[in-house]
Image (spheres, rainbow, N blue to C red):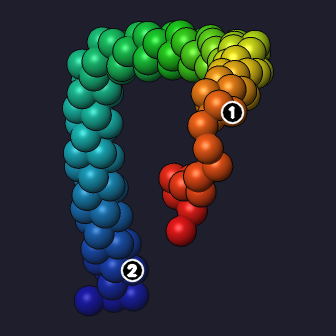
Amino acid sequence: MSAGDLAAVLVSIAAVVTVVLVMLCVVWLNRTLAAVRQAAEQLQATLPGVEELAKTVEAANTELDRVEHLLDSAETVTATVGTASRLALGAVSSPVIRGLSMAAGAGRVVGSLRHRGEPDQPTHHKGRG
């Protein structure tokens, strides 16, 4: 075997190894491409679900805005009722207290007028001991 024959054998072996490596790369790329196609199909199948999810999120945001508006209205009503209650209490309690004071004073006057004609007797006040 001459040097030319040996070189031809080595080049042939290198060519076969290169062809095998290129074929392995092609197989690997083919599998990768199949996986990418499958992922794209799955993604395409989930798009309606994603669109529905986006609609649901939008509807939830709309409802949250409505609830926030209702809470603001409830706070306003609570503040208004609180103010009205304080005003009503002020308007009613003062005349009631005055009326009770006048009734108590009138009761004392009537009591003292009753006891004027009676002989002096020690007075017993309730609650005092």
**Tag 2 secondary structure:** helix
Question: Where is residue 15 shown, x and y percent of the image?
Answer: 34, 65
| Residue at disc 1, secondary structure | loop
Picture layout, residue 107 above or below residue 115: above
- Residue that carries the numbered disc 1 in the rendered image: 116
- Identified at 26% across, 89% down, the residue is 1
What count of labels does the image hold?
2
Left or right of 120, for residue 10? left
Q: Which residue is mark 2?
A: 7
- Dot 1 crowding, Cα within 10 Å, few <14, some 14–19, many 20+: few
Say which mark, if any, is on residue 84. Answer: none
Judged by depth in the image, the label closer to the viewer, 2 or 1, is 1
Q: Residue at x 32, y 55 (%)?
A: 25
Q: Residue 11: in sight, yes or no?
A: yes
For the point 28% across and 18% down, which residue is it? 49
Side of 23 where 69 appears, left or right:
right
- Given residues 20 and 3, the one toward you in this image is 20
- Please determine whether, in this image, residue 96 is positioned above or below residue 27: above
Distance between mark 2 and mark 1 Cα atoms: 152 Å
Residue depicted at x 61% and y 27%: 114
Give residue 45's quadrant in the image: top left
Of residues 8 and 38, the one drawn nearer to the viewer in this rendering:
38
